[in-house]
Image (tube, helix red, strand yellow):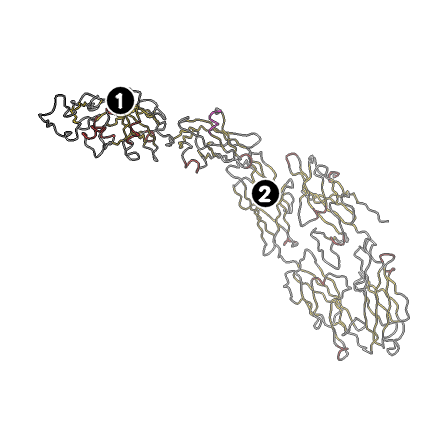
């Protein structure tokens, strides 16, 4: 049974500022497995730790663990597979957790935690060092699972050896989880035995098949056997086929048993590192040598180097980094051509030491004290105040990796200090040293410059922006305390086109965020005024409801308030004086709306005789209310006469039916003129209708005179009943204002012309023959009483 546990023992080491806390945990533990507690440390000093802030990074093991902010307990955050995370001797790490292997062979990851006190004061910068212990969770494997080798038929028994693949297990051999040598066995056969030899450099073993008896090609061309390793469900096997060949009795031999060389880490890709050489006394194909990396030499060299098979030249294929790998130790094989490797092969050891050069500039990482993603400081806050942790690394070593840093440009100046936390300068903190007004400086720009001690030195710069968090220390402001606005009343067409906008207020607030988000409202304003106006809260646009009527309200005054949206809001107010301008939306109105004006005048009335008066009112202002009254001689050019009895309330229209309507040849303005007088109140205009007098004197009898007839004919053709009536003149008045466009209204006037005794009596002769002769011939023979003629007396005046 596999024991699942986390080693909870933590050791603590002191760096002059930062602390390194060591923990252990086995791989493949469940998520939330307890790893250890930071609060158990007895070396945190006299400070009271209030919280722990894990610093998240993609370059370390911080994402593998969770740190409880209050208690400092560390728990596993995601599955951990040591074989995937940790680098091994056969491959470099492919993870992003920054895993490393120490000299004891322990695989570990690290991450940073800040211990914070009151006010987020940085007490300690902690480095958490977690060793990941291996468990036996992998079986062994031969790579590849089959192997084909060749052997010459004259190979010597007990001395001929065939190298075969070693089984591999990703688990740690040092902890006893790998393949034990005693568990590697050869299934019994007649020709070979299994030999487990320690290599010359004394670290690893190599498997060989040792020939036990001579071969005979004519009897046996191929031998098949099986090598097994491990036990139970984690066992593996290798199938080996050995092909027997004819004689090739000279084995290749390297000119050196070992090659040692120092190479700079800045070596150019695809350049030659060194060339190994071997000799073979055979001729033809048996003497041709093929060079290759020995896949069983337990080295990561294959990831960095390649060997030209025909020349033995070793070429660099991947950039070197002294900090990652300081030395490569691997084997090169020289063999004769063939499909497999046989005793006609030789190996040599190659040791390449990587020389450090100053090819890395310092790397600067800035993080917040409290673990947030951005650096920030609250305006007007107390100081000094820790706001950022600066971590500097250099991939070089010795003097090339030693670092010193200082502040570059700071804007605004003299508000930030860079304070070292450790003696080697790899950890520093950013400290705010002065109070900041966000309305003057909304952020602080800081440049950190670092350099190493190499020759020539490498330099780096890091730009960091620190946000200044706003407090609500400014209230909103209007540009003016009083706004005087003039606008047409809402009946004007352009008002609808403007969406009835009265004014767009724009207040400002020097704060930011919610402290500067403004809401507008109308306050302390009577309800009857609110029936006409409203304000859009978000935009400050004041509009009317489309019902502004100057004739109802010509002036409105109201208060507008603007308020910010902070928890403790500030506000400002402005007074709006709205003056409504007149639009010509009212027509002039006669004082007898819909009625006819009836007046009486005596014929032959003198000049300027007052016939009657009418009143006209226009509720607009200015030119819109300036009314001009005229006779309607354009739309109704005919002037009509009706006939009224001498009774003032009776109008006789029967005669009008007999002869239609009689039109007189002269317009109304021929007999009358109009005079206007502006009354002092309520825009009334008094209009007087007066006679023009001579030569435009009113003649009652002439009004019966139709166009084209003589007065005598006309008079003689009228019945006495008609002449007994008074004519009534009917015409229209137009009241027109001076607005643009103009508006007008109409009224009907009827003026009865009364008779005056201004005509002498007149004789009428009724005989046809004597009707036009003032004398009559009479015979002397006529008897007394003979009617020789008929005459009558007529007076046109009634």
At x 82%, y 59%, the residue is: 140
Q: Position of residue 267 (x, y in %)?
A: 64, 63
Q: Nearer the viewer, residue 66 or 679?
A: 679
Which dot marks residue 418? 2
Figure label count: 2
* Distance between mark 2 and mark 1 Cα atoms: 109 Å
Name the element at disc 1: strand
At x 75%, y 58%, the residue is: 89
Task: Answer whether residue 747 is visible to the viewer in this image.
Answer: yes
Q: Nearer the viewer, residue 613 or 5?
A: 613
Q: Is residue 349 left or right of residue 545?
A: right
Please tell me whether the stretch drawn in magenta is mainly helix, strand or loop.
helix
Name the element at disc 2: strand
Q: Position of residue 377 (x, y in %)?
A: 58, 38
Q: Earlier in the sequence, mark 2 or mark 1?
A: 2
Task: Answer whether residue 698 is visible to the viewer in this image.
Answer: no
- Vertical order, 274 against 529 (above or below): below
Q: Which residues are magenta?
A: 527-532
Q: Nearer the viewer, mark 2 or mark 1?
A: 1
User: In this figure, which residue is indicated by the disc labeled 1?
Assistant: 600
């Amino acid at each position: 049974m596999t024991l699942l546990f986390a080693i909870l023992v933590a050791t603590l080491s002191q760096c002059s500022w930062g602390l390194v806390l060591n923990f252990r945990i086995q791989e493949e533990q469940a998520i939330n497995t307890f790893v250890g507690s930071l609060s158990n440390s007895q070396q945190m000093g006299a400070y009271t730790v209030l919280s722990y802030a894990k610093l998240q990074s993609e370059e370390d093991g911080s994402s593998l663990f969770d740190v409880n902010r209050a208690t400092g307990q560390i728990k596993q955050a995601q599955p951990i597979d040591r074989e995937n995370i940790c680098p091994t001797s056969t491959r470099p790490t492919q993870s992003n957790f920054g895993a490393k292997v120490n000299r004891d062979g322990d695989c570990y990851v690290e991450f940073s935690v800040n211990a914070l006190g009151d006010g987020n004061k940085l007490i300690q910068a902690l480095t958490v060092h977690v060793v990941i212990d291996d468990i036996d969770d992998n079986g062994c494997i031969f790579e590849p699972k089959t192997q084909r080798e060749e052997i010459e038929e004259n190979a010597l028994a007990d001395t001929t050896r065939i190298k075969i693949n070693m089984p591999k297990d990703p688990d740690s051999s040092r902890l006893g989880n790998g393949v034990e040598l005693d568990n590697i066995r050869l299934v019994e056969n007649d020709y070979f035995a299994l030999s487990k030899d320690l290599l010359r450099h004394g670290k690893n073993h190599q498997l060989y098949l040792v020939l036990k008896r001579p071969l005979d090609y004519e009897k046996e061309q191929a031998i098949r056997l099986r090598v097994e390793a491990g036990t139970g469900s984690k066992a593996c096997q290798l199938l080996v086929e050995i092909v027997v060949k004819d004689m090739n009795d000279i084995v290749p031999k390297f000119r050196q048993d070992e090659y040692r060389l120092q190479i700079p880490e800045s070596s150019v890709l695809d350049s030659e590192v060194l060339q190994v050489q071997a000799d073979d006394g055979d001729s033809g194909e048996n003497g041709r040598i093929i060079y290759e990396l020995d896949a069983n030499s337990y080295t990561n060299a294959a990831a960095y180097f390649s060997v030209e098979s025909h020349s033995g030249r070793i070429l660099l294929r991947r950039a070197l980094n002294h900090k990652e790998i300081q030395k490569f130790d691997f084997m090169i094989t020289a063999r004769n051509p063939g499909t497999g490797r046989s005793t006609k092969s030789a190996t040599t050891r190659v040791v390449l030491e990587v020389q450090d050069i100053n090819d890395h500039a310092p790397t600067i990482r800035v993080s917040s004290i409290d673990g947030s993603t951005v650096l920030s400081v609250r305006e007007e806050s107390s100081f000094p105040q820790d706001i950022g942790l600066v971590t500097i690394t250099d991939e070089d070593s010795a003097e090339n990796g030693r670092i010193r840093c200082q502040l570059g440009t700071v804007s605004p100046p003299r508000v930030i200090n860079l304070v070292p936390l450790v003696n080697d300068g790899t950890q520093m903190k950013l400290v705010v040293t002065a109070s900041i007004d966000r309305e003057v400086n909304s952020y602080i720009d800081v440049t950190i410059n670092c350099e190493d001690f190499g020759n020539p030195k490498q330099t780096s710069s890091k730009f960091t922006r620190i946000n200044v968090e706003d407090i609500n220390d400014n209230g909103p402001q209007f540009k003016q305390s009083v706004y005087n606005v003039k606008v047409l009343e809402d009946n004007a067409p352009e008002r609808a086109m403007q969406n009835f906008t009265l004014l767009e207020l724009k207040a400002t607030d020097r704060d930011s965020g919610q402290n500067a988000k403004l809401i507008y409202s109308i306050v302390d304003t009577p309800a009857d005024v609110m029936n006409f106006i409203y304000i859009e809260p978000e935009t400050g646009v004041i509009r009317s409801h489309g019902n502004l009527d100057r004739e109802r309200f010509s002036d409105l005054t109201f208060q507008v308030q603007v308020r910010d949206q902070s928890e403790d809001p500030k506000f400002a107010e402005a007074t709006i004086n709205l003056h409504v301008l007149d639009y010509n939306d009212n027509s002039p109105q006669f004082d007898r709306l819909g009625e006819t004006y009836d007046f009486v005048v005596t014929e032959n009335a003198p000049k300027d005789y007052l016939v009657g008066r009418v009143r006209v009112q226009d509720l607009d202002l200015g030119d819109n209310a300036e009314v001009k009254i005229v006779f309607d001689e354009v739309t109704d050019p005919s002037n009509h006469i009706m006939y009224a009895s001498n009774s003032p309330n009776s109008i006789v229209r029967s005669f009008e039916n007999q002869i239609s309507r009689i039109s007189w040849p002269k317009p109304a303005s021929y007999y009358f003129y109009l005079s206007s007088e502006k009354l002092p109140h309520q825009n009334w205009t008094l209009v007087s209708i007066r006679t023009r007098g001579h030569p435009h004197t009113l003649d009652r009898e002439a009004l019966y005179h139709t166009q084209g007839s003589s007065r005598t004919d006309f008079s003689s053709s009228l019945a006495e009943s008609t002449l007994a009536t008074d004519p009534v003149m009917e015409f229209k008045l137009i009241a027109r204002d001076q607005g643009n466009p103009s508006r007008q209204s109409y009224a009907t006037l009827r003026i009865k012309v009364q008779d005056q005794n201004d005509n002498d009596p007149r004789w009428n002769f009724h005989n046809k023959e004597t009707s036009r002769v003032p004398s009559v011939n009479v015979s002397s023979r006529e008897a007394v009483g003979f009617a020789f003629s008929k005459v009558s007396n007529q007076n046109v005046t009634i």
